[in-house]
């Protein structure tokens, strides 16, 4: 389960990296998007491991938490980009696609 979550985290990380090209370089505090996103993921793992109860379930819980965080960040990034020129209805349609792709619609 943990390995599968790692694979999905990598897919979502790649999505965020592709979205990041739409932003100016200074957006990432002097880091490349790869560095910034990598550090973000590292910090989220540290946070979720700190919250986990311990034992073998900790890795699964931490990975699940990181995946949830990344999904939210991609959603917020798309909202920011789409907010530049699309209606609220268009954003809601995209959100519907996003939720359906995640299997949560």
Image: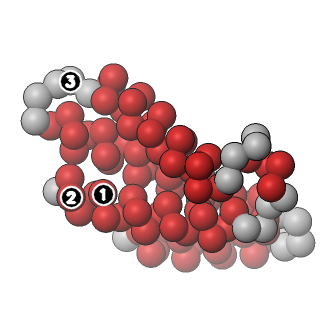
Mark 1 Cα shell of 10 Å, populated few (<14), some (14-19), many (≥20): some
Taking depth in this image into account, of 52 and 7 the one nearest to the observer is 7
Name the residue at the right extreme: 85
Q: Earlier in the sequence, mark 2 or mark 3?
A: 2
Q: Are marks 3 and 1 in contact (CB under 8 Å)?
A: no
Image quarter in which the N terminus is found: bottom left
- The image shows residue 9 at horizontal and vertical percentages of 39, 59
Task: Please identify the quarter of the rendering in which residue 25 is found.
Answer: bottom right
Q: Nearer the viewer, mark 2 or mark 3?
A: 2
- Residue tagged 3: 53
Query: Where residue 6 is drawn, which disc sits there?
Result: 1
Residue 104 visible in the snapshot: no
> Callout 3: few (<14), some (14-19), or many (20+) C-alpha neighbours within 10 Å?
few
Query: Is the residue under label 2 in contact with that under label 1 (CB below 8 Å)?
Result: yes
Tell me the element at label 2: helix
Residue 42 placement (x, y as % from top left)? 44, 39
């Amino acid at each position: 389960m943990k390995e599968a979550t790692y694979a999905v985290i990598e897919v979502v990380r790649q999505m965020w990296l592709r979205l990041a090209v739409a932003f100016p370089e200074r957006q990432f505090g002097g880091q490349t998007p790869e560095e910034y996103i990598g550090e973000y993921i590292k910090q989220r793992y540290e946070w979720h491991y700190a919250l986990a109860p311990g034992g073998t379930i900790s890795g699964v819980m931490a990975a699940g938490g990181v995946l949830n965080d990344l999904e939210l960040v991609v959603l917020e990034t798309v909202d920011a980009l789409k907010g530049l020129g699309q209606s609220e209805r268009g954003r809601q349609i995209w959100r519907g696609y996003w939720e359906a792709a995640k299997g949560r619609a």
